Amino acid sequence: MLKRLLGIIPVIFGVLLLTFLLAHLIPGDPVEVMLGESATAADRSALRAELGLDQPLAAQFVRYLGKLARGDFGASIHSHEAISHLLAQRIPATARLALLSLVIAIAVGLPLGIIAALRHRRWPDRLATLSALTLSAMPNFWLGPLLMLVFALWLGWLPVSGMEGASSIALPALTLASGLAAILTRMTRASMLEVLNEDFVRTARAKGLPERVVILRHALKAALLPVVTVVGLQLGSLLAGTVITETVFGWEGLGRLLVESIEKRDYPVLQACVLVIALTYVAVNLLTDLVYARLDPRVRFAA
Amino acid sequence: MIYRSLVDFDAQFRAAPALATWVCADDAHCRFTLGEDGRKFHDGTRLTAEDVAATYNSLRALKDTPLAAEFANIAEVKAVDENTVDFTLKSADSQFPARLIIGILPAGLIARNHDFARHPVGSGALKFVAWKRALTLERVADGQRITLEEVRDPTVRVLKLLRGEADLLQGDLPPELVADLKTRPETRVLESPGTNYSYLGFNMQDPVLRDVNVRRAVTLAIDREAIARQVLVGGSRSATAILPPEHWAGNAALKPAPYEPEIARALLTQAGVKLPLRLVYKTSTDAQRVRLATIMQAQMRPAGIELEIRSLDWGTFYDDVKHGKFQLYGLTWVGIKTPEIYRFAFRGDHAPPVGANRGHLQDAELDALIDRQDWQAVTARVDALLPYVSLWYEGQFAAMRRDVTDYAPAPDGNWDALATIKKRSEQ
């Protein structure tokens, strides 16, 4: 377990280095974005020095690491606001959206996958597979406006976009959940089909256990293993998905902050956003490993 | 809307009195006298000549703003009495009053380093209330609250209007969505001619595009009339120069280039260009810009020009444009009011980062005309040199719910009519 935790350190360092380099290598100069075209060369170099952008890259990186070690993300080049403050505003909004999407995806994907496997090659299976394929083929930037049209405009049940009121999270969460729900349906179905043909399921049935117990206690537990991995891996794409979904729905979260920081070449904000997302990835992967070990007795970490 | 400036512009874009009238003794000394209108700041204090002096002095002292460079020519700003302020310049500038379009701030708050970016205080028609997710303003005259919300996706903007979550949309919608809004019972669309100038910029250092005949061929290979009529919103018209013909420094004698692909092809052949001529055109990722690019690509083909479209994210695109990394690029000049734009965009010594001569045009005759401020001759010379392909002045439109009245879109797309807008249910 300790080894697993120690293994995270080089990953995080790599993430820091990569985001730093990528942010500085993409074309576009924040000083020019801030000053416009009519500023004098002296103004430019003064501001560049003030922001520390005149230092060599290596020096900028060391300074960045030093500040991070003290928990200081720095300030936005654009609004001069403390990045820790920006993150504290945006992370909860994204977390709420991502978690609700995850819950919806599991609540829809697992039962659909199980039903599809149990009714293999019959109409519930075909319907579930078709829905899963359709949903996974729909990009969020298209599905979002479609849901708005139906639920906001035609039915009038929900607001089109924004963050006013509790119901405003419903449409972005549904949009974000759709892809994951589709993947979960397909994974659960495939995994269940495989497990249902295993000897231990046949044995359980031969013992005369009720079908409900066979499915839920024996088959599902084994079938969940690959599904857990997928949920873990997909949580990352869920965070990536917030970039588009938040932009479409005007949801003031981390994804939208990321897009804005790229457009404004606001390097410190950009780096902080990518860092938070990368750390979430790392944490979720670690968590997935732990859950996996718990579900599968064959996997145990060396102490 | 929150601030008021000393000077505004009339319909011919001439400097017109706003907060103040003025008299210039010569091109380097001007006296501004404040009128009675708009003299109360939103914090209750009275706007005086001291505030005007403090505003312009604070701008001159700033480092990290293009405005500091804009006002570097001011030698002194002095409040003579409560209503009078004198500006003295380092060098003569006949256009100086037209530059004084900066909102006046309260001197007391400037002295206390007030954060105007987050809590603006001015003397304009609208008062700042809050900026949390959306910007909330209050009309001083009647207390009407107005909320401005950023909605990035055009389809979502339209859906919000149709659902009644928004009352007004202005500009930046694909024309088919505007056309759709015109047919809806719950909305109406007002259109007006625009003055924002869209163009293609040439790189004059490019070995092929250096030849004016090649540039002329590209100009003749675009059917701007058809695009303005069929693909742009109503009120769009073909352009001839950065400043429209109705501008006091505009040139009504210039005619839009016709669509003549055969002549274009002949010009290219005469210039010794091997056909098809391959040109790379850089634009942003904006869907409408990309669509216009593909239409121009198709129109250019009969002229023997193969246009390769590179659509780049805004930061990369703009950076390439400023650093001369392009053959052709497309942009729009927005809100241009004074002919000084010709110096900024075309004078030989105004290449980035000093100015916006991004194509590196070098022409001594044009530079001399710009320095003489002979704008008719400047526009004619630019039209002959063709550093830009003039495309169109895109029309302006505002789409609103039926119960919204007293609002009309401005030619440059500003929001000034929010000072008069009404919602019928509230009348």
Image (spheres, rainbow, N blue to C red):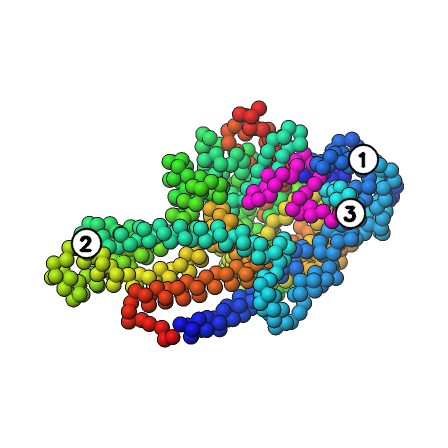
Q: Secondary structure at mark 2?
A: helix
Q: Chain of mark 1?
A: B
Residue at position x 54%, y 70% in the image? A17
Residue at position x 72%, y 37% in the image? B43
Q: Amino acid at mark 2?
A: Arg
Which residue in the structure is indicated by mark 3?
B111
Residue at position x 60%, y 62% in the image? A72
Q: Measure the alpha-carbon separation of dots 1 and 2.
A: 86 Å
Mark 3: few, some, or many residues within 10 Å (few <14, many ≥20)?
few
Q: Residue A209, image x and y in percent?
A: 14, 58
Q: Is residue A229 magenta?
A: no
Q: Residue B320, image x and y in percent?
A: 60, 61
Q: Amino acid at mark 3?
A: Ala
Which residue in the structure is indicated by mark 2?
A212
Q: Secondary structure at mark 1?
A: strand
Which residue in the structure is indicated by mark 1?
B34
Q: Amino acid at mark 1?
A: Leu
